């Protein structure tokens, strides 16, 4: 299991990291994002979408669970499962076609649906550190 630690000092740096990972993402890749409200999951997601070549705005799909973007190099499936009640809701929206398809998936609040995550994915954990300033984030990237 490979693990990397990256530090960012601004939203722009977190966005750039996402963009780089989006540029390098292969079809079928699944990224999960874990971290407190306001830590930068959506900022990272917006960068990743940009890296995939998705044009236009990407916002947190909080009220829909899944937002699909077709315009990039691969389909981009952006999940935000913050408000999910039960993993059955994931089945209702057909998450399997996304997780096991040829697009790139990114799941915000993925710890809420841990039991249905695929065998292999890239887990991204974002944490702040008040001692290091308001805009500081530590971003852990693990290949599961
Ligand atoms: P989440 O989706 O995790 O709830 P958002 O991405 O919506 O969080 O919001 C993150 C907020 O934190 C934004 O207002 C952003 O400007 C701010 N921020 C400050 N520093 C950073 C950083 N290093 N990386 C990402 N976001 C940061
Ligand atoms: Mg968000």
Image (tube, rainbow, N blue to C red):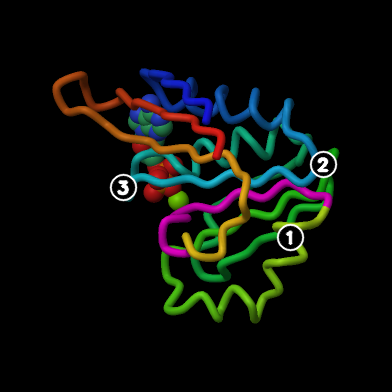
Is ligand 1 closer than 8 angstroms to the Cβ of mark 3? yes
Give neighbour class at mark 3: few <14, some 14-19, many 20+ (Cα, 10 Å).
few
Mark sitting on residue 113: none
Residue 7 falls within the magenta-colored stretch: no
Give neighbour class at mark 2: few <14, some 14-19, many 20+ (Cα, 10 Å).
some
Which comes sooner in the sequence, label 3 or label 1?
Answer: 3
Query: How far from the left and from the top, in percent, is residue 6?
Result: 43, 19
Q: Nearer the viewer, residue 47 or 27?
A: 27
Query: How far from the left and from the top, in percent, is residue 38?
Result: 34, 45
Residue at the spot 49% in from the left edge and 52% down from the top edge:
108
Q: CA distance from mark 3 to mark 1?
A: 25 Å
Q: Is residue 129 left or right of residue 18?
A: left
Q: CA distance from mark 3 to mark 2?
A: 28 Å
Q: Are marks 3 and 2 in contact (CB under 8 Å)?
A: no
Say above or below: 125 vs 136: below
Q: Is residue 124 left or right of residue 66?
A: left
Query: How far from the left and from the top, in percent, is residue 86?
Result: 46, 79
Report which residue position mark 2 lands on: 72
Question: Which quarter of the frame holds ligand 1?
Answer: top left
Report which residue position mark 1 lands on: 98
SS category of the residue bearing label 2: loop
Say above or below: 116 vs 29: below
Give neighbour class at mark 1: few <14, some 14-19, many 20+ (Cα, 10 Å).
many
The magenta-colored residue range is 102-113
Residue at the spot 57% in from the left edge and 39% down from the top edge:
122
Which comes sooner in the sequence, label 3 or label 2?
Answer: 3
Q: CA distance from mark 1 to mark 2?
A: 15 Å
**Quarter of the rendering containing residue 118:** bottom right
Report which residue position mark 3 lands on: 36
Is ligand 2 closer than 8 angstroms to the Cβ of mark 2? no
3 or 1: mark nearer the eye: 1
Q: Quadrant of the C terminus?
A: top right
């Amino acid at each position: 299991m490979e693990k990397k630690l990256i530090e960012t000092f601004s939203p722009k740096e977190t966005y750039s990291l996402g963009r780089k990972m989006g540029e390098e993402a292969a079809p079928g890749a699944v990224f999960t994002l874990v971290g407190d409200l306001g830590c930068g999951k959506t900022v990272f997601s917006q960068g990743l979408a940009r890296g995939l070549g998705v044009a236009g705005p990407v916002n947190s799909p909080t009220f829909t669970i899944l937002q699909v973007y077709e315009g990039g190099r691969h389909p981009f499936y952006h999940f935000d499962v913050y408000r999910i009640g039960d993993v059955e809701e994931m089945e209702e929206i057909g998450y399997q076609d996304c997780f096991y398809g040829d697009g790139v998936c990114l799941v915000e609040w993925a710890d809420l649906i841990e039991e249905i995550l695929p065998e292999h994915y890239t887990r991204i954990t974002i944490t702040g550190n008040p001692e290091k300033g308001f805009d500081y984030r530590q971003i852990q990237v693990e290949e599961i």
